[in-house]
Image: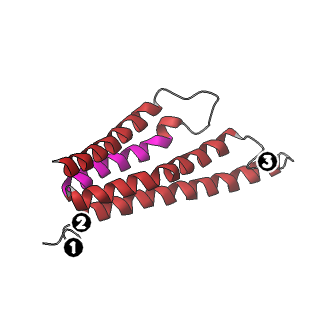
Amino acid sequence: MHPLEVSTQTGPILVTLAYLLVYYGLAVNAARTKIRLTREYAKRGEKFDRYFGQDREMLAADRFQLNQLEHMPPFLILLWLVAVFVSPVFATVGGSIYVLTRVLYPFMMGSRLGRGVKGSILVATLPSYLVLLSFMGALVWAIVA
């Protein structure tokens, strides 16, 4: 079986699609937050300014999506390198854990971005960094072994 056959890479394909679904879900959340806040500000006779107004809900919604976007290139590159050169199963398990941590991120951060970072955010970020490190380690091991 060739390593790039769909049957061999079904798990990593599903993980990739799930990751993109989470990303676009967060983008839709940011757009919905902007629309809602624009209406709320208008009812109070104020103008909503997404980028300079410093509304904490908008900052949080943007941060959720931007955090996902910031981590997208390293995650997807490492996921697929591991899937092809190490193990599609390892990529699927690690990738699934990673996507789950990305889903948890907004809940751990909270709906309003404050001045400090909540300690609970480590529940979402630490496991995701460990997955990326394990992917890098597996790739290095595949090269030197």
In contact (CB < 8 Å): disc 3 and disc 1: no
Name the spot of residue 142 as percent of width and height, x first. 20, 51
**Which secondary structure, mark 1?**
loop
Q: Which residues are the magenta region?
A: 89-106
**Residue that mark 3 sits on:** 41
Name the spot of residue 51 as percent of width and height, x first. 74, 48
| Left or right of 44 on screen, residue 116 | left
Determine the CA span between mark 3 and mark 1: 52 Å
**Which secondary structure, mark 2?**
loop
In contact (CB < 8 Å): disc 3 and disc 2: no
Name the spot of residue 37 as percent of width and height, x first. 71, 49
Determine the CA span between mark 1 and mark 2: 6 Å
Chief SS of the magenta region: helix
**Does 118 appear above or below 37?**
above
Which residue: 53% across, 54% down? Answer: 26
Q: Amino acid at mark 3?
A: Tyr
**Does 6 appear above or below 61?**
below
Mark 3 vs mark 2: in front: 2
Q: Earlier in the sequence, mark 3 or mark 1?
A: 1
Out of 77 and 41, give the one closest to the viewer: 77
| Left or right of 40 on screen, residue 17 | left
**Residue that mark 1 sits on:** 5
Which residue: 31% across, 65% down? Answer: 13
Q: Earlier in the sequence, mark 3 or mark 2?
A: 2
Name the spot of residue 74 as percent of width and height, x first. 42, 52
Q: Residue furthest right?
A: 45
Residue 94 painted magenta: yes
Q: Please tell me the numbered disc located at residue 96.
A: none
Q: Amino acid at mark 1?
A: Glu
Q: Please tell me the numbered disc located at residue 9.
A: 2
Mark 3 vs mark 1: in front: 1
